Amino acid sequence: MKKIISLVLALAMVALCVSALADDLTPATSALPRADIQITNLESGDTVKLYKIAKWDTTASDWAFDGTFSINGYDTVDDLVAAINNDGSATSAAIANAIGSKATENEGTANTSGVYTYNAEVGMYLALVTTTTANVYNPMILSVNFTNPTTGEGGTVDATSAASGTNAKVKKTHVTLEKEVKTEDKKQDVAVGDTVDFIVRTVTPNYGDNYQNPVFRITDTLSTGIEMTDAQQDAIVVKNGAGDTLVEGDDKDYTITASSSGYEISFTATYLHAVKANTAITVEYSATVNAKAVMHNVEEYVNDVDLEFSNSPTTTDDSLHDDTKHYTFSIDASLLGSAGGDEVTKELVKIAKDNNGDPIYAWETSDTTTWRTINPLQGAEFTLVGNDHTYTATSDPNGYLNFTGLDVGEYVLTEISAPAGYKFSTTGVPVVISATYNTDGTLATYSITVDSNKTSTYTATNAGEWTSTTTINDTAKTTGIVNEEGVTLPSTGGIGTTIFYILGGLLVVGAAVILVARRKAQD
């Protein structure tokens, strides 16, 4: 009997030398030939479990299933090999499902170069790979064939190559997760009221049919102070790498649960099994920045995204995480990290005169400073305009002007009303907020400049998590906005001059009426 051994490598095996068995081939019964089989492009430390599926039956001089292994629908090794040649992905998955409790031929790990090697007896083998990295592996079939009665030839499977057949799936998918802001500058500083556009990127694995209930779930959690409106929740869009919008539904591509604080997207087994190649996924959505209950001089908004996915047919034990960080800034606000939050940053103060009758323009905010006695003015109203926002503040009993939830950028501070008995200037005062960031996206420093004088520079201390122990090192100076005693005269065209014109006109009219009346009386 002459037989062509076509124990091919499924799932993108490289071509092996497939030898013809001569009619008179009679291998030695005591020691069948052995040869090395390899899997390359694994990750160092990946675990490979090798199961023997087919062996050489020396009695029948033919291939036979090894031991107790059997698979429904395939009576002979020839039938199984034909199925592998036709659709390597599906057949390999079916073999993996049928392996049951069969003992392993070998269990080993990939070396530092990502290569697994085993010296195997002639036959066909199933390799299942597990990993602690963000990879998903499909089953692989390897073979050792006869080259003559006493020698065998092994082969190599590249874990990154594609499988055989029209429905081929790659054997290894590296799963990634990234979340960022959809602007060119990846803007991190924001203002209360801003809408931030986010995009989440990931890659779905090529789950074989042996992954009967694969899990691939994205959970996006917004920070306190950033929320999605109902309209923004309805506008969440999920697309594949080709830019096609995926369809929501239990029997479609994915299901979604959304709320003001985030969303959860679960991809269906129907969709995951239909993926034939590494497929990019994007989730696009928008959310609005709101004020927190307490607005310190700097507020951090951390928006988390987590991905849970199956990296073996029976477990969901792998996950990835990413986040975006955003910051708002405030003037004359509670210093983040100060004891009890009692210290105020004091960039601006509305003042009258000091005890010597002189205006106070600045003083240092330091624990060792002896504070001068000041005469703060309460009730002065200001606007701060910039970055398409207008903010208002009224000086408090300490003279402080508290503007909260500001973005970096340029502003103009203008007084619009002075306390009773004082006059004010309508000349705008330039205010500039700037910030620098660490490579991990956390805030490094920020500064506030008033009227070309840098009044404050803050250095953030962040130990990896933004907590109550985080400190802001303050090297601030305070800029005083001075009001002098007196009354601000009405401006031309203002209500004050208008009243005078009206009164004057009435007096003229009245005088004319009296004059006319007197002349009539004389006549």
Image (spheres, rainbow, N blue to C red):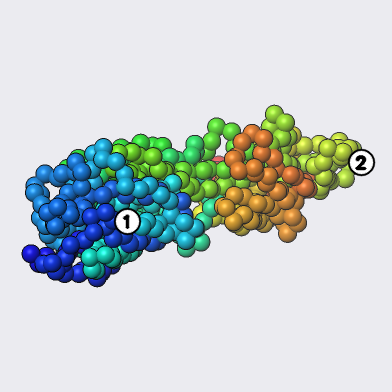
Residue 76: which numbered mark, if any? none
Residue at coordinates 32% horizontally, 56% vertically from top-left? Answer: 120
Classify mark 1: helix, strand or loop: strand
Outermost residue to the top: 340
Query: Dot 2 surroundings within 10 Å: few (below 14), some, or many (20 or more)?
Result: few
Q: Which mark is nearer the camera, 2 or 1?
A: 1
Residue 217's place in the image compared with 277, above or below, is above
On screen, residue 42 versus residue 514, left or right, reads left
Residue at coordinates 55% horizontally, 32% vertically from top-left? Answer: 293
Quadrant in which the N terminus is drawn: bottom left
Residue 334 in sight from this viewpoint: no
For badge 2, the amino acid type reads: Asn
Q: Which image quadrant for residue 454? A: bottom right
On screen, residue 213 versus residue 346, left or right, reads left
Query: Dot 1 surroundings within 10 Å: few (below 14), some, or many (20 or more)?
Result: many
Residue at coordinates 87% horizontally, 40% vertically from top-left? Answer: 369
Residue at coordinates 43% horizontally, 40% vertically from top-left? Answer: 221
Classify mark 2: helix, strand or loop: loop
Q: Which residue is mark 2?
A: 356
Q: Which image quadrant for residue 277? A: bottom left
The image position of residue 225, as x and y in percent, is 49, 38
Q: Which residue is mark 1?
A: 120
The image position of residue 297, as x and y in percent, is 65, 42
Please state which of residues 511 and 475 is positioned toward the viewer in this rendering: 475
Please state which of residues 466 and 158 is positioned toward the viewer in this rendering: 158
What distance separates the C-alpha of mark 2 from that of mark 1? 97 Å
Specify which label sits upstream in the sequence, 2 or 1.
Answer: 1
The image position of residue 482, as x and y in percent, is 77, 46
Q: Which image quadrant for residue 8? A: bottom left
For badge 1, the amino acid type reads: Ala
Number of marks in picture: 2
